[in-house]
Amino acid sequence: MSAAVTAAPSRPEPVTLREAFWVWLRIAALSFGGPAGQIAVMHRILVEEKRWIGEQRFLHALNYCMLLPGPEAQQLATYIGWLMHRTKGGLVAGVLFVLPGAISIMALSWIYALYGKVGIVSALFYGLKCAVLAVVLQAVLRIGGRALRNDVMRAIAGMGFVLIFFLGVPFPLIILGAGVIGFLGGRAGIAAFQVGGGHGASKGNLVADADTLLGEELPAHASPTLGQTLRQAAAWLFLWLAPVALLVALAGQGSVFTQIATFFSTMAVVTFGGAYAVLAYVAQQAVENYQWLAPGEMLDGLGMAETTPGPLIMVLQFVGFMGAYRHPGIFSPLLAGTLGGLLATWVTFVPCFLWIFLGAPFIERMRSNAALSGAMSAITAAVVGVVLNLAIWFAIHTIFRQVRPFAAGPVHFDMPVLASIDLWALAISAAAIVAMFRLRAGIFATLGGASLAGIALYLAGAEG
């Protein structure tokens, strides 16, 4: 029996930047649920629906963005916007991806600062942070489902978890080590390192690069002159570091604004592995070192970010807000908090544009390089271990009221005090996990139900 002949799909017609603006605005408005959900939305609209970019090119860009410090979803949007419409396209895509979340988190930060200690508001956030555990666990599984295709990748993920959770090895060293292993494995032609990384992409019929708007060709702007590259670097470095230098000079090292600027600028350089990995680093430093907020408040902020559009890393705006709100100096607390939140957002996201506009031309020219693909795949696998570390950190500080440090030689980690278990928190977390994994409930239904459970406990007089 002869097979039916299917005509190859025609490539989409070119779109203007104005037309692309409305598509990026739609993506921004639908970008809920952390990087896994956001990348899934981008894949569905850009690859499957619009066919602006193909499956392999999408994953190549995603793997590069996961290699970078900072939020991979926002950087992926910037990368694809740059591919389509040069620097202006990258700015439109990247800024629109951030804007809805920045506005939402700022409004919620004001509400939290003013009313967060009111019983019913605290109860709402109590339920919300319990459900966040299910969301982070889902992210582990979704990332791992596409990144851990073989035993080698699973071993790299396990190694990443052990190094960060039990030995306290810094994120950059873990990512660097995974990248070196993947580079050497890819260069040697080992098949295990030639796998597609990333999360959120479709597992159905693949959209071939040749059948998309961008095609397989290298765009002209992927080969910039040395002068163009230097001008891009100078402009973005100035936008990023000039405010930091000004604060250091005028306010001094003791100012909370200087601390926010320098801390989040450092974070923008050293935290690899996407939003969830960034949060692990920020939670440790903001809670334990700077003491800007408590572990429970960090979870409250994450709950805000999970329920608003835009990057999950927008929780950093909440961290900057609370840090300045509690150390206002010459300003009123709310004004100081607003300035601190905006400052944290600025020094977090401006470097993202620098990484894309400088690195994307090189990465585009290296799309067929096996060694680079191997390094990206190994780094994506190591990220799974980093995110698992974050999930366990959140679980310990949500379900148990007390933890104590455990140390034995090089091994050290927070040990929960079993007698301090919060049974209501455990019950809400377990219910959220069942809702998301067995009942296939959406993120809004799960987080909303958990918040209502927290309020119900408060009204019933149960202790949280």
Image: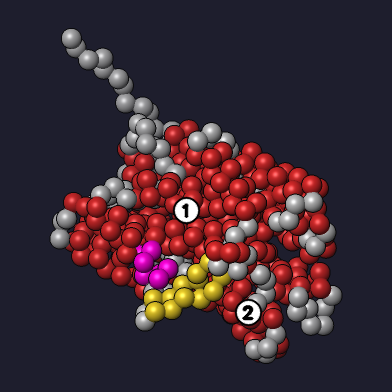
**Residue closer to the observer: 131 or 84:** 131
The correct choice, above or below, for 80 with respect to 383 in the image is above
Q: Quadrant of the N terminus?
A: top left
x%, y% of residue 220? 38, 54
User: Which disc, if any, is residue 338?
Assistant: none
Amino acid under disc 1: Leu
- Residue hosting label 1: 76
Q: Which residue is depicted at the point 41% across and 42% down?
A: 201
The count of marks equals 2
Give residue 188's quadrant in the image: bottom left
Q: Element under label 2?
A: loop
- Residue hosting label 2: 290
Q: Which residue is depicted at the point 54% across and 58% down?
A: 395
Amino acid under disc 2: Tyr
x%, y% of residue 207? 36, 35
Tell whether 428 sits left or right of 363: right
**Residue closer to the observer: 362 or 345:** 345
Mark 2 neighbour density, 10 Å: few (under 14) some (14–19) many (20 or more): some
**Residue 274 in view of the camera:** no
x%, y% of residue 426? 59, 52
Using the numbered discs, state the Cα–Cα distance from disc 1 to disc 2 in whole angstroms: 31 Å
Range drawn in magenta = 160-166
**Residue closer to the observer: 201 or 368:** 201
x%, y% of residue 103? 71, 55
- Sequence-first tag of 1 and 2: 1
Mark 1 neighbour density, 10 Å: few (under 14) some (14–19) many (20 or more): many
Q: Nearer the viewer, mark 1 or mark 2?
A: 2
Q: Element under label 1?
A: helix
Q: Which residue is depicted at the point 68% across and 88% down?
A: 254
The correct choice, above or below, for 437 with respect to 381 in the image is above
Give residue 445's quadrant in the image: top right
Task: Check if mark 1's residue and mark 2's residue have beta carbons within 8 Å.
Answer: no
